[in-house]
Amino acid sequence: MQISFKDRVYTSQLKNFVNSENNEVLIAGWVQETRDLGNLKFIILRDREGTAQICMKKKITGDEILNKVKELTKESVISVRGNLSANPKAPNGYEIFPNELNIISIANVPLPLDPSEKAVKADVTANIDTRLDNRFLDLRKKDVTAIFRLRNNIINAGRKFLRDNKFIEINSPKIIASASEGGTELFPIAYFDKEAFLAQSPQLYKQMLMAAGFDRVFETATYFRAESHDTTRHLNEITAFDCEMSFVDTENDVMDVIEGLMKTILSEARDSEEVKILNKEISIPEKFPRLSYDECLQYLNEKGITIEWGGDIDTKCERVLGEIVKDKFGSELFFITKYPLKIKPFYTAPENFDADDKYSRAFDLEYKGVEISSGGQRVHIYDLLAERIKRCNLNPENFKFYLDAFKYGMPPHGGFGLGIERILMRMLDVTVREVILFPRDRHRLTP
Ligand code: AMO
């Protein structure tokens, strides 16, 4: 008989039926466990929301169902229609006595990895490649599912914060004709007879929308980066909150928005069921310290680490700075401001809007010693921007479509990109591959 799933309920909804007159329910999901005690048999069925115990007694349950149970392998998909009954000894305080059991899909044995809860703790440190190769099974684990539910929640909270703050959600093109972040990290693609690339970021487009008068825009954007890094914090395809806003006085206005956005995200996480499952504590600083690049160099110097002025603050220095700031200011998040102009992209505003300035209006946001965001105020003056493009050894001809937007009225503006994987990896103290469903990295193109 063809069953209908229309009246299926999640296991989390079962409690509503325990004391109801009509206690017949239909649930469907994966066989996490079967137990055979002779006259008594149990199935633990798992769905997205949790688990439920199905109880079969020889005298009550028909042979048809009992014979089907014999065929079941772990992780097969079944549906069960049955009566819910309170039982203080059952895992949730209730169990289901089946009237009907359908085997929908039998799982092969052996499983490449065991998604049942007991395996979770051991598997978390197991080979990440085995987990990623069998991601559909790995994702069945309660704590792995929790990461992606948390991801969904923080993206939702971030979107709401931005919309409440008058940002309009946009979608910018992912097939582009020229670099937005400098030339070397582009993936070329075949686009009919033209040269084209996958977008590194929405940078040029979100700025053009400032000329269009949109005033405040955001995108939960995908960035494609042909970086050859093979680290625990780099991916080649990533997701970010990407924002741009007009009529800013300085980059401080942009930092205020990130600070609000991050506090919203952190408090959403702190109060969530998922963070409890993952056994994490989230701390939210009252204020994110804003330290200039020069101050950071000074702090590092006091620890015996010397960076030549204009040099990059590398991974190790970021980690050390993270510790220093936590000790001094009690905050896991802080901004590095006033970067040297020469190490920032062409669109970055020089401190005093002069191409010869030493400092810029660019910043990074650090979380537990890892960069999670970059941003700043931008150049909004046509001649200065054309000059900056040239000084960054790029060809202004390739940016005509973008430069034109600066000719007919462009307000002062600024923005940022805030990596969603970076937020999650630092929040949960895991590597970047664990917080994206199907990572694209130096070696991984499937699944
Ligand atoms: P940037 O290139 O610094 O800035 O990127 C912004 C943020 O995106 C994340 N990110 C990455 N995460 C993982 N793997 C990568 N390979 C990777 N690359 C970037 C980081 C980073 O802070 N257009 C500017 C933003 C702006 O100024 O508006 C930009 O793309 O969290």
Image (cartoon, rainbow, N blue to C red):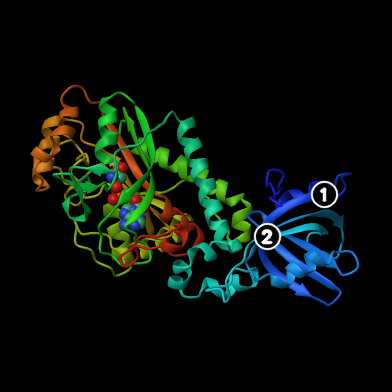
Q: Nearer the viewer, residue 204 or 52?
A: 52
Query: For the residue with label 1, is its CB less than 8 Å from the closest atom of ligand 1?
Result: no
Q: Nearer the viewer, residue 366 or 127?
A: 127
Q: Position of residue 286 (x, y in %)?
A: 51, 46
Q: Amino acid at mark 2?
A: Ile
Q: Quadrant of the C terminus?
A: bottom left
- Residue 291 vs 75, above or below: the answer is above
Q: Quick check: 271 left or right of 162?
A: right
* Residue with the mark numbered 1: 24
- Residue 420 vs 347, above or below: the answer is below
Q: Amino acid at mark 1?
A: Glu
- Give the mark, 2 or 1, whose residue is nearer the N terminus: 1
Q: Is residue 436 visible?
A: yes
Q: How many marks?
A: 2
Identify the residue shown where x is 41% and y is 49%: 289
Q: Quick check: 153 left or right of 223?
A: right
Identify the residue shown where x is 8% and y is 38%: 397
Instruction: Name the image quarter holding residue 49.
Output: bottom right
Q: Nearer the viewer, residue 107 or 230?
A: 107
* Residue with the mark numbered 2: 78
Mark number for residue 320? none
